[in-house]
Image (cartoon, helix red, strand yellow):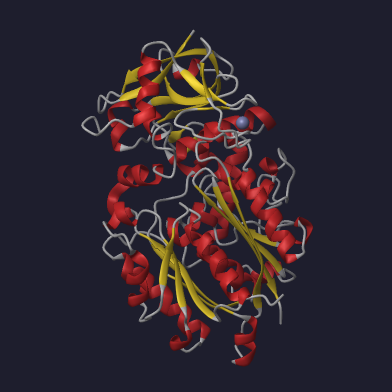
Amino acid sequence: MSDNARDGAFDDWLDAVEDGEGYYVECENGHGWLPPRRVCPDCGSRDLTETPLAEAGEVATYTEVSVATPQFSADTPYVTAIVDYGPVRVTGLLRGVDPDEVEVGMPVGIEAGERETTGDRAVVFRPR
Amino acid sequence: MSHPRVTGVGLTHFGEHSERTGRDLFAEAGLAALDDAGVDPDDVEALFYGNFMGELAEHQGHQAPLMAEAVGLDVPATRYEAACASSGAAVREAVRHLRSGEADVILVGGAERMTNIGTAGATDALSIAADDLYEIRAGMTFPGAYALMARAYFREFGGSREDLAAVAVKNHDHALPNEYAQLRTEITVEDALGAPMVADPLGLYDACPITDGASAVVLTSADYAAEHDLDAPVAITGTGQGGDNLALHDRETLARSPAASEAADEAYGDADIDSDDVDIAEVHDCFTIAEVLAIESLGLYEPGEGIGAARDGKTHATGETPVNLSGGLKAKGHPVGATGVAQIVSLAKVLTGESTWSDDVSDASVGVAHNAGGTVASATVHVLEVRE
Ligand SMILES: [Zn+2]
């Protein structure tokens, strides 16, 4: 996958996350989405602006994955979480905490990390 | 409205057939359905076919014409892909064609090969029903996604791994007499709780197996069935489909499946019934938590109430509204593209008295099939009713 062409707005977004400048796109009605988006699926607005992600989000739900796809075989077991950043939620790998210690509501920050198996970049959350 | 009839049904055994090609599996099910229907194959006007991972599992796209050929039909053939709801979507399109008068006889079916690519390969192939950029690259697997929903459900409504285990125990029990089922073994709650974790809180026994298999039904217009004096008492009286954001994190709620609720509301309205009229249901229990979400979406239980239904015996064959008398995906098996049509087959058999469970539900006249794609970004619901 590393040799593939960049995935446009997704890789731009991940670059920003890597630089500590993560963002989401927001319509004038406050609906938040991850890029790329040309229209808000909730209200149809096409006026979307880049808005900074908060310093920390809260774990909304998580799982420790024991049976993975081949692209994650060396990462197994690992924790995947959905984190709530207010108007937008993001899915990523939760690191830096014992899986038994993870709690819903726990504050986490976002960064770009690497998959152990392939070296590809991935969204990583760490406890704040 | 004139409702299409389920005129013939066919299944392969669901299980491991790793050395059989998809075309051979579908030919077996399709020919069985045509024989069961007793229609002249020359009268079949189209094949609507469901398949999800053919490119990955068999390096075979463009499967529909291949499958028409496999059953000896020279008709227009189209593949429908909506992840695990692929053949549910195919049924819906066939119902709409038959109702509009555009066709009188349509073969609808599905097939999937999965065991030949192994557990890791199948996990990978199934995962592509999720959002590649934002979910798969974050390690999301199909079981992982349902685990995220299970934990969100527990948090919002309560419930435990024991409650989920009761769903698995019930569906294994239902599969015992089903000769087409993959897992015909009795299990206990303790077995389920002691099984290895796949993605916590879901263990191996919370998950459906990896399955090869095919399914087919011959659907005919009511007029055609009458003109040809066909024995086809079961009609599809309602159809509905709902959709949602593909990525789980974009959904308003992680503990419900609104796409299935929309599909159910539409299908019930179409059939002019409500959830109280439902006697039996075949629902998409790819994971134990999925059955809980399904019976709530179908309006059989309020949100938060479905978690105790299996534990309390309400969804067992002997309970108030039996769910998954076939064994469900959990024990019957889940050859992805074949699943939606297999649910129609199972319901039709129960309603016509051909199932070993028919005696236990002898008053049943209304059955509902719930077929979900991915984490329920797609859902179809069909209502089947006995009409002499
Ligand atoms: Zn909006």
Q: Is residue B278 visible?
A: no
Q: Depth check: A33 or B32 in front? A: A33
Left or right: A10 in relation to B56: right
Provide residue B8's location: percent of width, then percent of height: 53, 79
Q: Is residue A54 above or below residue B32?
A: above
Which residue in the rendered view is the most extreme toward the left?
A3
Q: Is residue A73 visible?
A: yes
Which residue in the rendered view is the most extreme toward the bottom?
B228
Provide residue B269's location: percent of width, then percent of height: 74, 60
Q: Depth check: B344 or B359 in front? A: B344
Name the residue rendered at 56%, 81% in the picture. B104
Image quadrant occupied by the C terminus of chain B = bottom right
Provide residue A45's location: percent of width, then percent of height: 60, 33
Q: Is residue B220 above or below residue B94?
A: below
The image quadrant where one finds ligand 1 is top right
The image quadrant that residue B2 belongs to is bottom right
Q: Is residue B253 above or below residue A54?
A: below
Q: Is residue B369 above or below residue B74?
A: above
The image quadrant that residue B224 belongs to is bottom right
Q: Depth check: A73 or A109 in front? A: A109
Image quadrant occupied by the N terminus of chain B = bottom right
Which residue in the rendered view is the most extreme toward the top?
A128
Left or right: B25 in relation to A56: left
Name the residue rendered at 56%, 28% in the picture. A47
Provide residue A70's location: percent of width, then percent of height: 29, 37
Name the residue rendered at 38%, 70% in the picture. B26
